[in-house]
Image (spheres, rainbow, N blue to C red):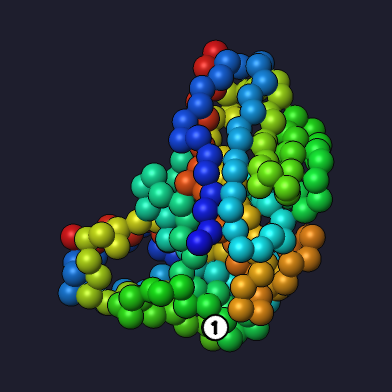
């Protein structure tokens, strides 16, 4: 596989469930990101990992817990979510977190999450 | 605070030209990106501007004026497959690394 992949593509969970979203990049990048995309709202940055170290937690509630075991994999662990957490969760990667000209972010297809 | 504005929706005719505007106010600036996102799919990179002026890439061009905090994406010879959301995003330095902030996107509908 190439690019950035995410599993599952769709997830329905109750408020008391625990689930995990998985992201894998095959681009040899060193930075990975989680974004939340709600209907008619801008993409919101949630977490940034650079060389497997979390460098940004954008005021995200503790019911979202990221994990980056290596530079190719990123997880988002979910527990006791609320209905307003229903959204598209996008993973992205880039060469690094610098401002180099060619350092664009590549996105995965996203996980459509519905919390009942 | 950081803010990006772009129109919510636009419509255009197949074969025509459309310009999607974006204005921004950010605490720093390290480049402006345009992404295309089809419904239910990942955003895909279209263009990048860091200096003032026009960048051309086939049917797509992007313009930047840093003094005005303004950019536009120009799409020529529109095709039905260009119906998508177009996201304007600004990269700025923050806390030792670079963050990307997105606008809400402009949903473009191309009609025959």
Residue A11 lies left or right of residue B102; in this view the side is left
Q: Position of residue A40 (x, y in %)?
A: 39, 44
Residue B53 lies left or right of residue A22; in this view the side is right
Q: Position of residue B76 (x, y in %)?
A: 71, 24
Secondary-structure class at tag 1: strand
Q: Position of residue A14 (x, y in %)?
A: 19, 67
Residue visible at 49% across and 65% down in the picture? A45
Numbered label tally: 1
Residue B100 lies left or right of residue B63; in this view the side is left
Residue A31 visible? The answer is: no
Residue visible at 52% across and 44% down in the picture? B5
The quarter in which the N terminus of chain A is drawn is bottom right
Q: Closer to the camera, A78 or B89?
A: B89
Q: Closer to the camera, B106 or A74?
A: B106
Residue A35 visible? The answer is: yes
| Residue A71 position by quadrant | bottom right
The residue marked by circle 1 belongs to what chain? A
Q: Is residue B78 above or below residue B42?
A: above
Residue visible at 18% across and 74% down in the picture? A16
Q: Is residue B57 above or below residue B28?
A: above
| Residue A20 position by quadrant | bottom left
| Residue B58 position by quadrant | top right
Q: Residue furthest front?
A: B67
Which residue position is annotated with label 1? A54
Q: Position of residue B50 (x, y in %)?
A: 77, 53
Residue visible at 60% across and 84% down in the picture? A52
The quarter in which the C terminus of chain A is drawn is bottom left
Q: Is residue B67 above or below residue A20?
A: above
Q: Closer to the camera, A77 or B46?
A: B46
Dot 1 crowding, Cα within 10 Å, few <14, some 14–19, many 20+: some
């Amino acid at each position: 596989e190439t690019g950035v992949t995410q599993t599952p593509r769709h997830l329905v969970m109750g408020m008391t469930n625990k689930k995990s979203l998985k992201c894998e990049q095959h681009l040899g990048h060193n930075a990975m990101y989680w974004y939340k995309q709600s209907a008619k709202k801008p993409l919101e940055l949630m977490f940034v990992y650079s060389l497997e170290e979390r460098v940004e937690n954008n005021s995200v509630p503790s019911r979202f817990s990221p994990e980056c075991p290596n530079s190719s994999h990123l997880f988002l662990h979910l527990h006791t979510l609320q209905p307003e957490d229903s959204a598209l969760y996008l993973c992205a990667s880039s060469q690094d977190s610098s401002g180099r000209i060619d350092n664009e972010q590549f996105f995965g297809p996203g996980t459509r999450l519905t919390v009942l | 605070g950081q803010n990006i504005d772009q129109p919510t929706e636009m419509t255009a005719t197949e074969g025509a030209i459309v310009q999607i505007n974006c204005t921004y106010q950010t605490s720093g600036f390290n480049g402006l990106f345009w992404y295309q996102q089809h419904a239910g799919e990942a955003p895909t990179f279209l263009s990048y501007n860091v200096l003032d002026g026009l960048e051309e890439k086939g049917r797509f061009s992007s313009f930047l004026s840093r003094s005005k905090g303004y950019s536009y994406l120009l799409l020529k010879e529109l095709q039905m497959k260009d119906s998508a959301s177009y996201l304007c995003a600004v990269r700025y330095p923050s806390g030792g690394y670079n963050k990307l902030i997105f606008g809400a996107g402009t949903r473009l509908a191309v009609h025959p």
